[in-house]
Amino acid sequence: MKIAVFISGRGSNLKALIDSAKAKAFPAEIALVVSNKATAGGLSYAAEENIPHFAVSPKDYPDKQTYEAAIIELLSAHQIDIVCLAGFMKLLSPYFIGHFHGPILNIHPSLLPAYKGLHTHERVIVAGEEYSGCTVHHVTEDMDAGPIIVQKKVKVSKNETPDTLAAKILKKEHQAYAQAIRIVVSELKAYTSQTTTKNEEENIMASPTPTPTKVDPEEIQRYQLTWTRFTVISKYSIIFIALVLVIMALTLL
């Protein structure tokens, strides 16, 4: 399956996904990279691997829907099955979510549903949380609220800073995103297989019942008459043969 990765910055998760996709057992390929910023460092990873990549700036479009429609057209042109948001700093609108018909995944640096939104690490430390982590989830119209696919946990140290916590969680993010893609692709293949089987069964059930061949009543009568004549002739033939055999036996005596 073909994946498009959306980025806005350095693209560390993009790089991790590119590396994961090089494994023969990985069930998808990174087929497109899209950024809302031409200066995004992650675009260089795509260039190095000869992956089609585009900087699509919202400033070049009159409104958000037109902007998102251009991205959807790009996804369609590259036959993308799954979109992965990896540090993409633009909220997708209901229009985009409704018009792209594949899964849209996002990774967030907290154990959702806790600490949605920005400045996650600072808020975790201030709250005195013992654990934090990352979550890969399906994207819905509500921010950071879609069904959870994978979570990874890290322990928050006593002297933790936002930077040290971010570094620890980032390592987990690289593992979690690849794992989530494997799960989603597996689910998609299972769904596709079930749908195909169901359609085949429906086609069989919907097939027209063969129309019975109509038999001409006169043909039946002719058949019955012929059979009757054959039966009568056969009976008299047997009697005649029996008489001949009796006469021959008497003659021999």
Image (cartoon, rainbow, N blue to C red):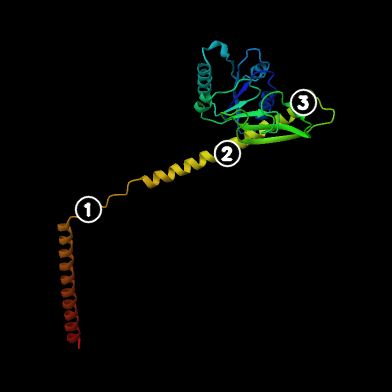
- Residue drawn at (16%, 81%), measured in percent from left and top? 243
Answer with left or right where residue 42 lies relative to residue 212: right
- Residue drawn at (16%, 71%), measured in percent from left and top? 232
Q: Which residue is mark 2?
A: 187
Camera-side mark, 1 or 2: 2
Q: Position of residue 193 (x, y in %)?
A: 51, 41
Near-viewer residue (94 or 40): 94
Residues packed near mark 3 inside 10 Å, few (<14), some (14 to 19) or many (20 plus)? few
Q: Position of residue 154 (x, y in %)?
A: 77, 33
Single out the residue that lies furthest toward the top.
60
Camera-side mark, 2 or 3: 3
Q: Which residue is mark 3?
A: 167
Marks 1 and 2, how far apart in space? Answer: 51 Å
* Local SS, label 1: loop
What is the quadrant of residue 49 in the picture? top right
Q: Mark 3 belongs to which amino acid?
A: Ala
